[in-house]
Structure formats: structure tokens, C-alpha cells
Image: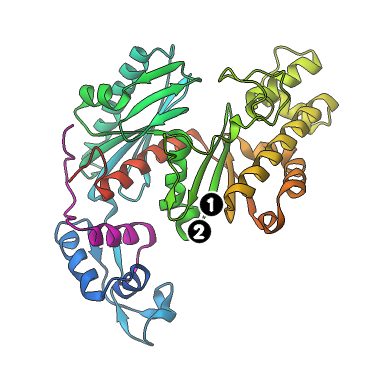
Amino acid sequence: MPKPNRPLPLGTPAGVEVLTKILTQGPIPRVQIARRTGLSQAAVTKAVAPLIDAGFVTDHPAVTEETVPGRSELGIGRPVSPLTVVADSVSVIGLKVTPTDLIGVTTDFKAGIRAVRHRQLPDTSVGTVLERLADLASELIGTLEDKTDPAGPLVGIGVAVSGDVDAGHGYVRDSPFMGWRNVPVAELLGEKLDVPVVVSNDVRALTVAEHWFGVGVDADSFAVVTIGSGVGCGLYVNGEVVQGAHGVSGELGHLPLAPGNLVCTCGRRGCVETVASSDAILARIRETTGQPELDLSGAIQLAHRGDAHAREAFDRAGEVIGSALAAMVNLVGPELVVIAGEGVADYDLYDQRMRQTFAEHAFGAAGDCRLMLRSHTFDDWARGAAATVIRSYVRGESPFKR
């Protein structure tokens, strides 16, 4: 695998830890980094010096403690020079794959989106998708060369796919939505583009983005539950996004909590997705209303107007999701659950039933877990793929071994 265009000057675990703190919590003074990592200030200074010299980190002009968050940790009136990552020091591309579309973004080192591109897919065959992915990535690479908006060197490409993904080897073992089994995406796409490629489960990629650049920055533990064509779950506990011993974890959508006569896209019966996914909700409303041409937007409008059949479908989904959330929270105990997905803000229709069922089944203090409803776009999923590249790049993980 080719090396990134701009390798990081990180030779020790301390350097990785310091850069991670600056990236996720900056601007941040050296003294706070030392206190939060347990390193000495001398070790922090030693670790950050080559990063400043190479242009990855900048040392702001001295300011007083009153302008710095967490100023109580500093001596009164003492001037400090907070450290922050230079956003444009590198660029990253993130790609999200769905059965009908490809979504691509370019981001800076802080996962800030710079450019967005959407492309439709004619089919889900591996050859077609990889060819279109390569074309989309090449187009995004072209945007990085715009002289009017200069960007940093490209260091890698992230690809987010639903299903069972072996992230360590860049392999999609099983993606029911795509109809893929045992596809070496990183290898095949890397050969086409000659750029390091990181492949991740899409929900786990979104969780990495929340961990490094979102609600998870200050959280000890959290979960991201996504609701769309499927139902997924990413977990952050004990200081890390859970990968699972075999690359599978947090498969909330496949807990057997729905009626056993319902067959899931995975081929099993009674999965949460058979009732709670957007596809399942729409199918139920089409069936009960006798309107086979109804789309999801129309189904939501029906429910908002009080149609009994539409409301029943959303209530049923909310009840199953609430039970699944309670099961997950009882087992893992996160302090926060972010419920996300395309158009999830429209699903206030099942919010009350979901929270009611969750409260009924959450055990003891697990019921204190906060549930946060938040809409995400497909651009956010692609940004998650970029975030996995940033994490691997900083940590020196495959394919960025130093």
C-alpha cells in the first residue's frame, strides 16, 4: 500500500496521545495536555515540537487564561499559548456507499467538510460500484488542486459500507443491502487510486466521528443508534469505539425483538429492522392503508394527519426500538445515546412511544441514560468515513503503519 503524501512526525505513543488531545480538544494549552494525559510538561513540549516544525500544529500567540476554556487549571493571569491543529495541513476523502447512491466529501484535518459530491448507482455489482467509487474519488481529488482554495496533501480515503466489515484488512465480509460477500474493497480501490484506503462499517465510522469531533469528545461512554433503511448501533466504552472480536458489534437491528413471522433482509426472522427500519414502516403503512404507491414522505404526512394505520406503524416501530435501546443500555451502560439517521427528525412520531418503552425496560440507574434525537445527512456518513482515516493516520494503524 502506498504511503500517505505527508507522513506525521510521530515516533512515540506519547506523541500520538498529545496530537490526539490537540486534535479533539484544541485549542488547548500544554499544561492542560499534561494534566489530562499524565505526561510531564517537558514530555508534551518534546512531543509537540516536531509537529509545530512540520506545520501540523500551531502555537497561538500568548493569551491570558481568561480566553481559554478550563482556565481554573492555570495560575491566575498566567499567559498561555494554546495549541491547535492546522486544519489545512492535510486533506482526506470520505465515501459513503448505499445501494442507490455514492456520497463523497473532502475534509480537512479536523474533519471539516470542504467539498461534497453525490452520484447515483445503476446497480450494486462490485465492479460497477468500485469503478464509480474510483471516478468519484478522482473527481474529489481534483477539487483539492483548486488554486483559489488550496488544500493540504491527500493522506487517505475512507469508505463506509453497511454490514459486516473487517476494518483491519479493508474487507467487506457480508453486506446484505449491497449483496456483497468477501469483497477486498481496500485492496481493489487502492490499486485503482494508489492512495491508502480505510474501509469501515458505516455506523462505526459515524461513531468515530462523534468520538473525535462530536458529542463523544467529553463523554465517558456513548452509543450512536442509526435508523434508516436499516437499524445500526455504534458503541464507545472504556476509551475506545468497540470493534468486536470478529469485527461485529452493536448489531441492534438484528436483535430478535420483533414478531417471528417477519423476515429480515439478513435472512433471519424477528429482527428489530423488520419493524423499525424506514423500509419496514413504509411497507406496513402501504399494506394497512391499501396504498402500494405511497412513499415515505407521504406515509409521514399521513401519520401527522392522524391516520390510524400510519400511527400504528410508527407506534409499533417506537415500541421495538425502545425495547432494543433498553436491552443495549442495560448491557453496556452508556451515559448518552444519540439516535441519528436520514430524516430522523421527522420520526417524532415514534419518539414518545420509544421513550415510554425504554423507561419501562431500562434497569435501575440505566434509565438515567440520555436519549438525544438528531438528524444526519448522507454527507455526515461520508464525513464519518473521513474521520476513520484521520484516526488511523494519527495512530499509525493500517494502512498508515509507521
Residue 249 percent across, percent down from the top left:
49, 38
Relative side of 33 to 347, left or right? left
Q: How is the image coloured?
A: rainbow
The quarter of the picture where residue 33 lies is bottom left
Q: From which residue to which does the magenta span run?
A: 1-29
In depth, the one of 58 and 178 nearer the eye is 178
Residue drawn at point x = 41 percent, y = 52 percent = 212
Does 158 sit above or below residue 275?
Answer: below
| Spot occupied by residue 105 in the image (x, y as percentages of width and height) | 37, 35
Q: Nearer the viewer, residue 66 or 389?
A: 389
Instruction: Name the residue beneath numbered marker 2.
Output: 219
Determine whether label 1 and label 2 are within 8 Å by CB. yes
Q: Amino acid at mark 2?
A: Ala
- Using residue 334 as the reference point, say whether residue 190 is left or right of it: left
Identify the image quadrant of the N terminus.
top left
- Residue 25 among magenta residues: yes
As displayed, is residue 111 above or below residue 52?
A: above
Which amino acid, by three-letter code, is at mark 1?
A: Phe
Residue 78 drawn at (x, y percent): 32, 85
The residue under label 1 is 222
Q: Residue at x 58, y 56 (%)?
A: 335
Q: Quadrant of residue 273?
A: top right
Q: Secondary structure at mark 1?
A: strand
